[in-house]
Image: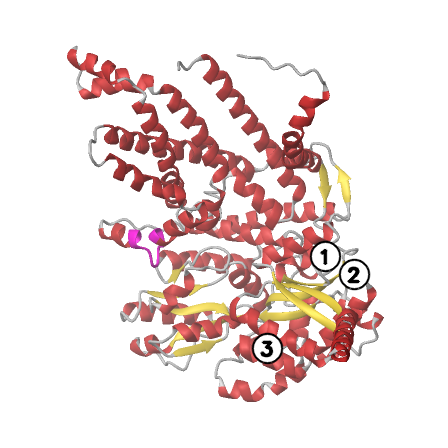
Amino acid sequence: MNRLFTASALALSASLSAAHAQTEIQWWHAMGGELGAKLEEITKGFNDAQDDYTVVPSYKGTYPETMTAAIAAFRAQQQPAIVQVFEVGTGTMMAAEGAIVPVHQLMADNEVAFDPQAYLPAVVGYYTDTQGNMLSLPFNSSTPIVYYNKTMFEKAGLDPNTPPKTWAELEEFSKKIIESGAGTCGFTTQWISWIQTENLSAWHNQPIGTEQNGFGGLSARLTLNGPVQVKHWENLKRLSDEGVFKYGGPVGGDNAAPMFYSQDCAMYMASSASRAGVIANAKDFELGYGMLPYYDDVEGAPQNSIIGGASLWVLSGRPDEEYAGVAKFFEYLSTPEVQADWASFSGYLPITQAAMDRMADFYAQNPGADTGIRQITLNEPTENSKGLRFGNYVQIRGIIDEEFEQLLSGSKDAQGALDSVVERGNALIAEFEAQNQ
Amino acid sequence: MKRTLFRNQWLPWLLLAPQLAITFVFFLWPAAQAVRQSFLRQDAFGINTSFVGLANFRALWNSPEYLNSLQVTAVFAVLVTVLSMGLSLLLAVALDRMIRSASLYTTLLVWPYAVAPAVAGILWWFIFNPTIGIMPYVLEGIGYDWNHISSKSDALILVVIASAWKQISYNFLFFVAGLQSIPASLREAAAIDGAGPVRRFFDITLPLLSPTTFFLLVVNIVYAMFDTFAVIDATTEGGPAQATNILVYKVYFDGFVGQNLGSSAAQSVILMGIVIALTAIQFRYVEKKVAY
C-alpha cells in the first residue's frame, strides 16, 4: 500500500513537472462558432504532436473587440504571444514597431526553416513590407466573388451557366430578370467599402492611395476618388434608383444575404468564405459562381482582386522560449495538410502553393470553390492590387459607408461623396501619422 | 436634527474611508485619467506619447461630425424624454381612474423595465427589420416604405421608440406615486366648483405633480444621453450617415473601435461637463422652484 502510494506520488510529481516544462502560448482570436471549433481542433493537432509547447486559443469576440483587447493587454503588459487581427488593422499593427515581432524575423531568430517563395504572393502580399518581408502570417483570407441564382437566370431566359463578365452585362442581365418577373432586383452586395471600393480599384488596377496604396509609409494619402471609382459609384446610385441594385446596409451589409436567399435579388457579391453559408441557405434554387464583373473600357481590367480576412501577429515582450514555440506553430500552420484542411473546411484561401496543389481534388469536386483563388491569382499583383495599408482604417471604412449612404440619399453626387471620403479619411491618416512619430 | 459630535478627529474619516476609497478608485481616478489623456496624442499601443494641449478639443470643435453628433444627441434626448414621459403620464392618469384592475395593470407595465437595453434594441431591430420585420410589412400596406438602413429619419424614429419604450415603466411608477400623493379632496373641491376633468388635470394635478415631473425630466434626459448606448449599438450602430451617432456612442466608437484615445478622452471630458451642468441645474432648480 505504502509502496503503491509512493509510486503514484512519484508518477504524479513526474507528470506535474512534465506539465510544468511545457511552455504555454496564448493565442487570442475572433473565430466564433464552427470556425472556432475547427481552429481549436487544428491547435490540438499541434499540441498533441509535440511535448514542448501548448498553444492555448481564446475566443475574444469580434475582430475589433479582439484587437482592442490585445492592445489594452499590451498596455497593461499582459499581452498574448499571438493575436488574430483583421486586414484593416494591418496599418495600426505595422506602425507599432516596438510592439510586434515580424514573422520573417521570428522565423530567423528561432532558426525555423522559412521559404517566403512557398507562399502565394496574392495572399501574403497584403502582409509584407515593401522589401518583401512577411510581417504577419495570413490565417483566414478570402476575396469577394459573385454568387448567382441559376434558377432565376433560367426563368428570365438567360443562360444559367454564364455569369455576367462585365458591369454592362450585369446590368443587362439584371434588367432581364426584373422585366421577366423572375425577381424584383438584379443584385445586392456585402461590404460597399471592401468590395465596391477597394476591390473595384484593385480589379481595375486603379490606385487606392499614394505610396503603393500605403505600403510605402505613413505619409501615404488616399486617392480613391479617381474616374473609375467615381463612375462606378455613379452607376450604383443610378441602378439603385432604378431598383436594379439594392443596398444591404453598412459594414458587412447584413441585409444583403436575406435578399439573395429569398430570391428577390438574382445576384449577390460576397466573400468567397461565405460559400458554405450561401449553400446552406440556397435550398430552393440552384447556385452559380462567377468572378467580379469589370468595366471593359478600363485598360488593364481585370487585374486581380485583393483579400480580406485576418492574419496572425506576434506581440513582443514575451519570454524567449514562447517565441521558439510560436515559430514552430506557424511552421505547422503553413504545412500543406493543415492549410488544405482549414481552407476546404472554411472556404478561406490556402496561403501556400503546395496547399493549393493539394486541394486540386477538392476544387474538382466542389464547383465554384476555386473562383476566389482563380480571381486572386489571375495576374501578378501590381502596386495597385497588392492590398492597402493605412492607419485608422477601421474608421475610414465607416466613412466610406457613410458617404455612400449620402450618395444614395441624394445629398451628394458620386464625385462629391468620394471627395469627402478622401478628405475625411486623409484627416484621420494625418492624425495617425502624427501619433506614430 | 441631532448633531453627532466626534471627540476623536480620525474616527469620522475612518468611517468614511470605504466610501471615499470607492469614490476615488472608481470615479475620481478614471475621470482624472480621462482628463489627462485628453491633452495627449498617443498611438494605440501607447509607445509614442506627446502633449498637445487643447488640440484634441480644437479638432472636435472643427469637426462637422462632432457638431452633428451634438445636434443628434440634443434632438434624440428631447424626443425620447417627451415621448416616454408623455406616454407614461397618460398611462398613470388612466391608472388613477381604475378601481379593480389597477395592480394587474401596474405589474404588466413594469415589465419592459426588466428588459436589458441590448435585448430591447434587438427586439425592436427585429420588429422593424426592413427585410424580415413585421412593421415594415404593415407600413408597406399603408404605402410607407420603411427602411432605417438607408433613411436617416427612419433610423432616428427607431432608436427613439426603442429607447422611450424602455423608460416608460420607470416614469410610470413615479407618476403613479406622485398622483397618489395628491389629496383627492382638492380635485373633489374643484369638481364641486364646476371644473371638468381636463380643467382639473391642468389646474390641480399637473402643478402638484411638478416635483415628480421635474425629477423625471432630469433623469430622462440623462438616460437618453448616456444609457441608450446599448440600444444604439444593437440597432443602428450610429448610422446611417451618422444620423443616430449620439455622443456616448461616438466616444465608444472613436476610442474602442478607432483606437483614437486622445479624441475619445476629450469627448468624454466634454460629456463629463454636460453631466455636471445637468446635475447642478437639477439641484439648484429643485431646491428653489419646486414646491414639495
Q: Is residue A347 above or below residue A195?
A: below
Q: Please state the chain letter of the residue tagged with numbered disc 3 in the rendered image.
A: A
Badge 3 crowding class, 10 Å Cα cut-off, few under 14, some 14 to 19, many 20 or more, is many
Q: Position of residue B17 (x, y in %)?
A: 67, 29
Q: Assess whether mark 2 and mark 3 are in contact (beta carbons under 8 angstroms).
A: no
- For residue A318, the mark is 2
The residue under label 1 is which amino acid type?
Gln
Label 2 sits on what residue type? Arg
Q: Which residue is mark 3?
A: A342
Q: Magenta span covers which residues?
A: B127-136
Q: Is residue B252 left or right of residue A244?
A: right
Q: Are marks 2 and 1 in contact (CB under 8 Å)?
A: yes
Instruction: Tell me the amino acid under the disc marked 3.
Output: Trp
Counting residues from the N terminus, which is met first, the one under dot 3 or under dot 2? 2
Q: How many marks?
A: 3
Indicate whether B51 appears above or below A344: above
Residue A381 in view in this figure: no
Q: Nearer the viewer, residue A91 or A57?
A: A57
Q: Would you identify the image quadrant in which residue A150 lies? A: bottom left
Chain letter of mark 1 equals A
Q: Position of residue B201 (x, y in %)?
A: 25, 20
Q: Are marks 2 and 1 on the same chain?
A: yes
In the displayed structure image, the side of residue A215 where residue B201 appears, left or right? left
